[in-house]
Image: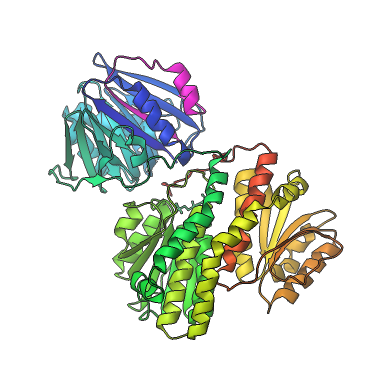
Amino acid sequence: MCGIVGITSKNEKIVPGLIAGLKALEYRGYDSAGIAYLKNHAIKIIKSKGRVNDLQKIVNMEEETTTGIAHTRWATHGKATSKNAHPHSFGSIAIVHNGIIENYAEIREELEKDGYHFKTETDTEVACALLSFYYDKWKNIENAIQSFSKKARGSYAIGLLCKDIPNTIFAIKKESPLIIGVGDNENLIASDVRAVLKYTSNYYILSDNEYAIITPSEVKIYNQQGKMVSKEIKKYSGNKNNETKNKYEHYMLKEIMEQPSIIDTTIHEYFEDGISSLLAKMPDLTKYKKIDIVACGTAYHAGLVAKYLFEEKLNLETNVDIASEYRYKRLFLDKNSLVIFISQSGETADTLAALKKVKNLKVDTLGIINVKESSIARLVDTVIYTEAGDEVAVASTKAYTSQVLLLSLLVFSEAIRQGKLESDEQEKIIADFKKIPKQLTKLLASNVYQQIAKTLYQQKDIFYLGRRLDYYLMLEGSLKLKEISYIHSECYAAGELKHGTISLIANNTPVVASFTNEELNEKTISNIEEVIARGAEVTVITNDLDYKGGNGIKNIIYIPKTSDFVIPFLVVVPLQMIAYEVAKLKKCDIDKPRNLAKSVTVE
Ligand code: AGP
């Protein structure tokens, strides 16, 4: 989603720094880019559709300027054109913006009555015009920002230049993320700290309804009423070198391959001193009678796995909701409820809004989050960090397995705490957890995924089937395929297919199915036979080593028998590999699929 970077430096020419910052934000997903800088009391703007590399070709990297803002745009209002790209300017003001101004149509109408003419369909141009309107009215930029914040509804992180105020960037923040990098010779703004690491690891996090005035030697932060606020300076503690592909062709493949070692590290950490360290590190859930889990996309699928485990292993009622629905629905929560929020980025707008709603109800919240110090991580009562490291590919892989691992460990620890597992069962499950890295390494060494991909990549529709836990896992496999290969895919609970969707199964329709639950395997095998009878060609993932397939079964991936706590990893990693190999054969932009954003910071 939109990325913002801005630099004001004592002496450095800042265009290369802005371009480098935009490149560091590319992972967020975007469709156009632009920069604006101050020079000789004027603002120069350059924008282009497409990639940051396209923008780089048309900017002067040697330009004599020390203050500028830049942006990668993920289109919301108005198509992905260079005209709609940011920065936008009006009068003395130029801005870059991440978020949505919800009442932009109403503001636009009012400004049009005042003689303003708009060149684009964007809400950002309207925001810029409103700031310009107030600036012209008050002849004071701070008053303009305060008036803007009172009038504009919605979410916004804004970087602003005013041609009358040299060497200064203004930042305004409500709901969308924005940090201020504090360097020795320059200060910066960015949507994500990763965009400022070339200059500094020190940063402030702007809170909602704050604005800042940033010069090369000073950062001043104010609340909406114009009162100065003091803030703790943070230090980036991540791995600055995480963002190289190493020997891999794509970040996605690198991140898939990292999974065994991430799981290994996490398991060692939680079982450092056996069960006692697991119990010490995991929160006690004994008092809760009901769990809600809220997330989006892949994180939602991780939540479904947790639901299965909470219900099966703890007999604890658990509902999983998509955050964009949960934030608007009636909630049935009380002091014995816990709401778990799962998010890789910790910035997903819908998940954050749902969290704020639950916080208002004073119900306990727990976050399973990857990005440290992210908005959701800061707001939940308790946070458990997944230790996946930076995930660059838009398609989530290692973040998903890290989320599922922590949720599995959480349920396992609670089952021990509540006396639901005999000690020999506990030992068996721990042994199963410890086997995952080796089992995954073996699965990842196979070349079966390329062979399967050859049979799938020219298809138009692919169906995924499973029951119970397998269904939840296949949902993730289906999403992975859709997002990076652009092949239409649907996932169904195997028993549901005959209630309508089976009409879509015809000769050679590809189906991917998994069955890993002894009690249900026969049922799923019958459903597989039903689709084969209608011409489907089926790829199977199973831990039933006696299953030999038959007519219509094109591929079988055997996975080891193991505990329910561990099955998800062994099923989903092969599904990630199938999606990856299919997208590779289709020559798709695997790490940055069209239309998608890594961090979805608008509703
Ligand atoms: C999955 O591959 C996607 N990147 C997407 O579904 C993602 O999981 C979703 O947008 C939620 O993001 P979050 O984990 O950062 O909240």
Between residues 374 and 454, which one lies in front from this camera angle?
454
Q: Which residues are magenta?
A: 48-73
Identify the image quadrant of the N terminus.
top left
Between residues 405 and 456, which one lies in front from this camera angle?
405
User: In which image quadrant can residue 242 be found?
Assistant: top left
Between residues 86 and 394, which one lies in front from this camera angle?
394
Q: Is residue 118 visible?
A: no
Q: Is residue 289 above or below residue 191?
A: below
Image side of residue 254 versus residue 43, left or right:
right
Q: Is residue 311 above or below residue 185?
A: below
Q: Residue at x 51, y 39 (%)?
A: 245
Q: Is residue 227 visible?
A: yes
Q: Residue at x 29, y 41 (%)?
A: 179
Image side of residue 452 versus residue 354, left or right:
right
Image side of residue 437 versus residue 163, left or right:
right
In percent of width and height, residue 46 lies at 41, 20
In percent of width and height, residue 445 lies at 65, 52
- Is residue 54 within the magenta segment? yes
